[in-house]
Image (cartoon, rainbow, N blue to C red):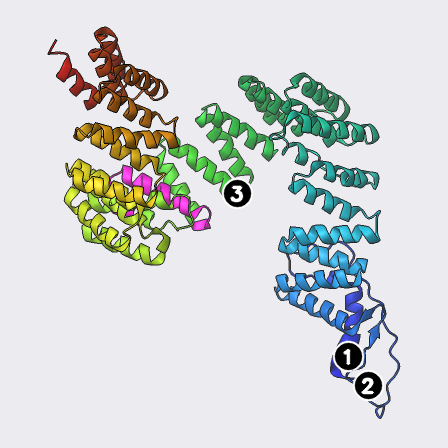
Amino acid sequence: MIKLQHFLLLLSLSALGACSALQPTADVDATDSAPVLAQPDPQPVESDQAEPDAEEDIAYGNFTRDQLETALLSEFGGMRGYLPQAAENYYELALETGDTGIIRRAVEFASATGNNDALLELATLWLQHEPDALDPHLIVGYEFLEQALYMRALPHFNQVLNLGGNVDFTAMSARTYDLDDRQRDVIATELESMREQHSDEATLYYALAQIYDQSGDTAAGRAMLETATERFGDNPRTALLEAQLLQNAGQAGAAETLLGEAVARYPRHRLLRYSYAQLLVQNDKLRDAAVHFTELLRLTPGDMETLYSLTLINLELEEYDIALEQLRTLLSAGHRVNEAHFYLAVIFESRDQLADALHHYQQIGPRSNAFLSAQRQIMRLFVAMERFDDATRWRQQRSISTPELGPILPALEAEALVNAGYSERASVALDAALTQYPDNIDLLFARALLSEQQDNLPKAEQDLRHIIQLSPDNARALNHLGYALAVRTDRYQEALELIQRAIDITPDDPAIIDSLGWVQYKLGRLDAALTNLRAAYSAFPDAEVAAHLGEVLWAMGEQNEALEVWQEALTKQPDSTHVQETMERLVPAQ
């Protein structure tokens, strides 16, 4: 008797012969023909015929039994959702057999699983067996395009055109903005050569127009676009490209007008209307943009990303009632969930509904870009509601669920407490956190700043020196300690050495240059102090730097210039205590 396993294989050969009908999942594109496997012609088997030896290597056409089993198991595995293993099996089988049908099927599985490396290797193998096959040239071309290997992609795209296929060359020109002009010139020369051979390929014209514009040759770009329009007629794509050229040339108004007219001609073209709406947003015409996003939603009611864009506009316009309902719709659809929670929290907080705001901040997941910001707001709201124990419990729970936040959350809690005037509670929180994380630089710095506020310079100095011991090149700690010594003690030489170390590490930091100028003033080196303070104020016209610069000018007899510096600073920062205290200390005395 034939073994059941062999019988199943024989029955399945016809299915493998057209295995495109056996799709691994609905996500696999199986439009290409599948491997056609040669079938043996089984002879009738008498009931008393001897059973074949189990170890006999039976061949089925060009394939061994093991290869057929691999193909069958891969097909069935793909049908049941085991795509990665099925893709790996077909990949190995393609390399082993070199059969173009198997290679095609392996390509389908590699594409379905997003394995670009395997896709490129398989398509290259396919070309070795079928050099004039269109699909592998297209695959290899786009894979090289993804890797920014443009000159390696172009010969394959050219062959696709030779074989009667289509290529969108604007997929390349959309990626060449970051290239230097020389590289773009090489690509443009190759595209021009291809355009001479394939003058009916419109996207070659569009791509060349973009590349010329990227290289600063706007005239050549406009000329190429005009040629394309004359040859292929006016269409939404030419309108989009022309608007882009106008925008790049600084003619935002003309680009807006052109797109508006194009939208009127092609009212149902989504990309055109979306681009117009985006341009209106850029030009700060939010209400006009909202009209077009609303129309886009009418055209495609289920487009949640368009709804999200419209929601952001309504938030900016302070149309909170409308935005509230839109955010709830996004939540119901499971789209942009973290962002929806964040903006709902912002709305509720603006309405002083702190408990509701807190609830939504707490829903934001750790993978969201808004997560840390949400944790800061949670701590702030707990403190604002005087729910100190809840703040601590939240911090402890989050530290367990997200261990990497362990040392960050106490700093956020302490920040919230300090800002609300609860300095002693903040000290307790930081002391407890540093017991657990004694060498955490952020926590040490937070406690040093708090100690300074509490006029506890010894404790601040201890923490800052601990940071410097842990990180000798920490310019921020070096500068902060040096400045603290210059302001709060007469240890000026020691302060100068610390600040000099900091400026050797980051010589262009205006805050450190300001510290250097100030300690030089304390040491009586007025000329050097003035030079450095002028440089710091020019780079960073802050009120505290202005107070220092003005005081040095005053000491050097330049009272009029000192007053001008102070007045300028007060115009920008009228509540600056640094300038006010300096003027009160110096001006009445004269």
Q: Is residue 416 visible?
A: no
Q: Which residue lies furthest to the left in this view?
A: 589
What residue type is disc 1 on? His
Q: How far apart are marks 1 and 2 (CA)?
A: 10 Å
Q: What secondary structure is found at the residue carrying circle 3? A: loop
Say whether disc 2 or disc 3 marks the residue closer to the N-terminus: 2
Q: Where is residue 41 in the image (x, y as percent from the top left)?
A: 88, 75
Q: What secondary structure is found at the residue carrying circle 1? A: helix
Check residue 183 in the rendering and tell me which mark sits there, or answer none: none
Give 174 or 403, whichever is nearer the viewer: 403
Q: Position of residue 215 (x, y in %)?
A: 64, 23
Q: What secondary structure is found at the residue carrying circle 2? A: loop
- Image quadrant where residue 211 sits: top right
Q: Residue at x 56, y 19 (%)?
A: 257
Task: Give the answer, above or below, for where 490 lies relative to 306.
Answer: above
Q: Mark 2 points at which residue?
A: 52
Tag 3 near tag 1, CB within 8 Å: no
Q: Which residue is drawn at 70% across and 36% down?
A: 150
What residue type is disc 2 on? Pro
Tag 1 near tag 2, CB within 8 Å: yes
Q: Mark 3 points at which residue?
A: 303
- Image quadrant where residue 576 sits: top left
**Left-right relation of 427 to 286:** left
Closer mark to the observer between disc 3 and disc 1: 1
Give 157 or 263, whichever is nearer the viewer: 157
Closer mark to the observer between disc 1 and disc 2: 2
What residue type is disc 3 on? Asp
Read off the magenta span. 332-359
Q: Name the residue under label 1.
A: 6
